[in-house]
Image: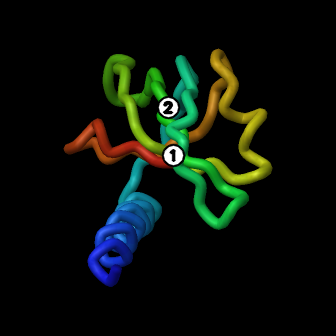
Amino acid sequence: MGLIFLVAGGRFLRRERRRRWLARHGVPAQAVVIACEHTGEVVDRINVVVRLTLRVEPDYKAPYKVALSWLLGPRDGMRLVAGNRIGVLVIPRSPQWVGPD
């Protein structure tokens, strides 16, 4: 039983550490939502994890696509509709590292 909690907790800890690192070192950019799909994962009976496909449009390079898992809060639903523009943070050295702004 403890192993299950260790694995699940490790995933959330890794996600939170990545989010904090992005908030500290990320460069702001714009992205267009291409697709948003529910993964079936629910956190605290309120937040859901979705699989997002984004076209990131940073100022310093050509647009590119990225797919990532995103924790969707109760107020984020209308933000992540296909075609909407959202603010993201990007790491220039690792363009696949994208997170919400």
Up the image or down, 79 lies above or below 9; here it is above
Sequence order check, earlier mark of 1 and 2: 2
Residue nearer the viewer, 36 or 90: 36
The answer to which quarter of the image holds residue 7 is bottom left
- Residue drawn 28% across the image and 42% down it: 92
> Under tag 2, what secondary structure?
strand
| Residue 67: x %, y % from top left | 38, 30
| Residue 72: x %, y % from top left | 63, 48
The answer to which quarter of the image holds residue 16 is bottom left
Residue type at tag 1: Trp
Residue nearer the viewer, 77 or 98: 77
- Residue drawn 46% across the image and 62% down it: 23
| Residue 49: x %, y % from top left | 54, 47
Numbered circle sitting on residue 50: none
Tell me the CA gap for discs 1 and 2. Answer: 7 Å
Residue 24 seen in this snapshot: no
